[in-house]
Amino acid sequence: MANPESTETNEAQLAVHWKEEEYYYPGTQFIAQANMTDADILDRFGEKNFPECFKEYADMLTWYKYWEKTLDTSHPPFWKWFVGGEINACYNCVDRHLPKYRNKTAIHFVPELESDPIQHVTYQELYVRVNEFAALLRDYCGLKRGDRVTLHLPMVAELPITMLACARLGVIHSQVFGGFSGNACGERIEDSQSRFLITMDSYYRSGKLLDHKKQANIAYETAHKLGKPPEKVLIWQRHPGKYSAETPLVEGRDFIINDLLPKYRGHRIEPERMKAEDILFLMYTSGTTGRPKAAQHSTGGYLAYVTGTSKYIQDIHPEDVYWCMADIGWITGHSYIVYGPLALAASSVVYEGIPTYPDAGRPWRIAEELGVNIFHTSPTAIRGLRKAGEDVPRKYNHHFKHMTTVGEPIEPAVWRWYYNEVGKKEAVIVDTWWQTENGGFLCSTVPALAPMKPGSCGPGVPGIYPVVYDDDGKELTAGAGKAGNICIRNPWPGSMQTIWGDHDRFVKVYYERYCKNKDSKDWRDWPYMAGDGAVLAADGYVRILGRIDDVINVAGHRLGTKELESAALTVEEVAEAAVVPIPDEVKGRVPDLYVSLKPGYKPTKELQEKIAKALSDAISPIARPKHVWIVPDMPKTRSGKIMRRVLGAISSHGATGDVTTLANPEVVETIRVMVQDEGK
């Protein structure tokens, strides 16, 4: 029987008795060209060689100064990697490739409109553009090593150019997902104490040119109200030489980058020699409280980890044309569109728009035209493309050697469509599991060495030692058939250093739960808790079941329920709000919102729309709930806690369990009839 006092929907309790799927094996053609075919890698990266095994990743980079200590554990869990080393991320992604790959494409920028030509930015052009923009940031803006800037840019070539220019100077960049609202951007400007906001006037979405500049105005005002407005707003033009937004410029505050750049033509900036432990970027992720938290990522450890995993797990060679269809506003885009692929001298595709514009054949036409041979996307995108036409990929002559899925678990039926139809039974698939906080992959098969299994992401990648604990800290062994909390027993170079400005929260959220001895300096006593439920199969493969806290993973975007509820409570009529995750055919999970009203207000369709819009405006259109249920009262415990478990069961048409101990058990049936009758 469910515990009626429980206030969380525990996804680790979901469907843990799924049957294990059959293996799919990599083809001989893939194995013949793979970067990693040596089975000894698992031994080389085994625990007896930890932490020195990660020297193999760091040696893929060019260092100004070699490190003195691979891992410093003197202040757990604030691990320090490659201590004493000096390096620059921009140099490793651009400069060092010029002797051999100067005229090779670094970035293929694909505009959403098919009538617009694809832009092929060579490594030489990337070098020139990054240097000139770095000169502008240094000489015009006065930015220096350690300063922060917030970027609110769409998927355009200027986004990686801006990131790399910041990295060249040692300026810490904080890119906010372009689809997030100005309010969300402004909060992040204030939290990071950013000196500048860098944005774009407009961008294309579903064939329409959207006014993005208006979000910059909202962001500025939000940051201003919080006491930390940016000094200037720098604006890239989506169409160089033409201002495309309806929102006017603010004199003295807003500056067009394209107008300023000619003054810096030909300028070259010597890359800053950064310490390995210096911060490269901040990446905000929703937490279980209302305020987003910034994962702080290092320069040397992070870059080594994403380079190594890009080479061995993504199988990226300099000859490859690689397309990750994620957004650079998320960690996947940072690690596996920009830093990892460019460190390996690959050609990386940046696509502006949605995958189904103007139709579901668009991705495969892009792949045909560019000769893409590595394809990387999310289960949400795969489900959407499948829904738009199961046989569409057959109409195109694309050929992938390798495909990735990332961001959330993928259902076996969807995995098989991806393998059979998109990959044409030729491509290997790596189903990866990791998080914003982790920097790079944690679990996946090494593609040429281990078979694929639909629905399972595979074992820990080389150098990662996963474990599944129950709520009492007891290890759940492989094949036990029980779900628990997946943890990583060891530190790794790509992991976040801390939460920006909140070390206590960092320890509490990720390490406190399963710490064996808080006074220990032995890394074995400090397992990292991911916050995801998982089952470990007898073969050591991991099946991820989803979040065990109250963060909802919507199409790979993590949204805190407290943020969503707070947005609903900004509506004057709303007294209480509760958000629960429900399954969705395309997005995997979406929020279902329950609200009760203040006295004197009545439920209407117009009010439902007003509340839904409040979530979209405050956070993002991604946050829009599937339903807004206006209920007479919330089911509550006698202590006044809203029973989200009960609401989640109603939304998912499941059993509510024993509700007799609630303060108001009669309301449960009222809500159930309302929700389930309307859903018929």
Image: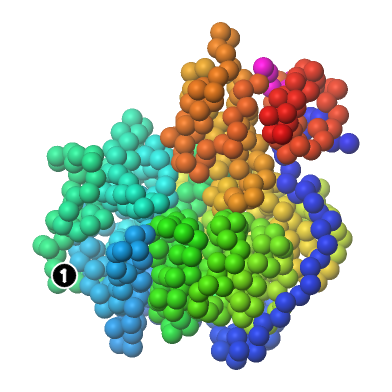
The C terminus: image quadrant: top right
Picture coordinates of residue 401 (x, y %)?
Answer: 56, 80
Occupied quadrant, residue 163 = bottom left
Q: Label 1, secondary structure: give it.
A: loop
Q: Residue 280: x and y, percent?
A: 40, 61
Say what amino acid the circle numbered 1 marks. Answer: His
Say which residue label 1 marks.
267
Q: On the rendered structure, is 521 left or right of 653?
A: left
Question: Could you tell me if residue 124 is visible in this image?
Answer: yes
Q: Nearer the viewer, residue 421 or 672?
A: 421
Q: What residue is at 14 percent from the left and 72 percent from the top?
A: 266
The question of residue 506 being in magenta is answered with no
Q: Is residue 44 visible?
A: no
Q: Is residue 635 magenta?
A: yes
Left-right relation of 447 to 330: right
Question: Where does the image place residue 523, in percent across and percent down from the top left?
Answer: 66, 63
Q: Residues within 10 Å of mark 1 (few under 14, many from 20)?
A: some
Identify the residue shown where x is 73% and y is 46%.
Answer: 11
In this rendering, the answer to whether 669 lies above or below 346 is above
Q: What colour-coding does the image apply?
A: rainbow
Q: Is residue 176 above or below residue 412?
A: above
- Boundaries of the magenta span: 632-639
Q: Nearer the viewer, residue 257 or 196?
A: 257
Q: Majority secondary structure of the magenta segment? A: loop
